[in-house]
Amino acid sequence: MRTILLSMICASTLSLSASVDVSLTFDDPVVRSLFADLLRLGGYGYVNTERAAFLIREANGDYRCALWTMTGRWKRERFSGVVPAGTVAVVHTHPNRTPLGSPSDRRTSLVLKVPVFILTRENVYVITGDGANVALVQARVWATALSGEDRCR
């Protein structure tokens, strides 16, 4: 519930994409594999810490993710710095018992004007650029097997 705190957002001069089709993005096999790897790094939702990353779309259309440095804070993560160029979303894990996006996640989405994906073992929610909390997956294991290339780094 108490998830991402972004600082120094205003220092960023990037133009972030506000018009990401979250369903198509999540259905992309590379994106889903990157999300699955982040879920793995986050202990599959069985721990009270979170892992977070920026989802980045390169100029050639390929997706990659840029991990945030892990702080190990209880039920939240923090990023300080400049948001990477090409960022189309923020993605992070939650403990399994709190699958919904938090008020902090909503603020992050509204400030950055990008979707914020929330991952747990059996749920994927996304807070859209307008602040809506939308279920993409509910009550089923969604993570797929990873290829060696689709790692969140």
Image (tube, rainbow, N blue to C red):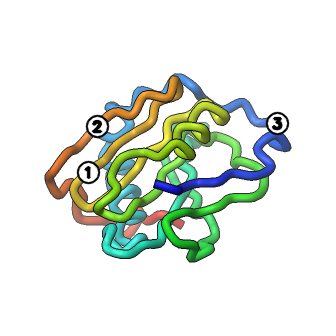
Tell us which disc is closer to us: 3 or 1.
1
The residue at the point 28 percent across, 37 percent down is 135
- Residue where numbered disc 3 is placed: 13
* Residue 151: x %, y % from top left: 43, 65
* Residue 110: x %, y % from top left: 60, 31
> Mark 3 or mark 2: which comes first in sequence?
3
- Residue where numbered disc 2 is placed: 135
Q: Amino acid at mark 3?
A: Thr
The residue at the point 66 percent across, 34 percent down is 111
Q: Amino acid at mark 1?
A: Asn
Q: Alpha-carbon neighbours of circle 2 within 10 Å: few (<14), some, or many (≥20)?
A: some
- Residue where numbered disc 1 is placed: 123
The residue at the point 27 percent across, 38 percent down is 136
Tell us which disc is closer to us: 3 or 2.
2
Q: Are marks 2 and 1 in contact (CB under 8 Å)?
A: yes
Secondary element at image label 3: loop
Q: Quadrant of the C terminus?
A: bottom right
Q: Is residue 14 above or below residue 104?
A: above
* Residue 59: x %, y % from top left: 61, 37
Q: Is residue 41 visible?
A: no
Indicate which disc residue 61 carries: none
Q: Is residue 34 visible?
A: yes
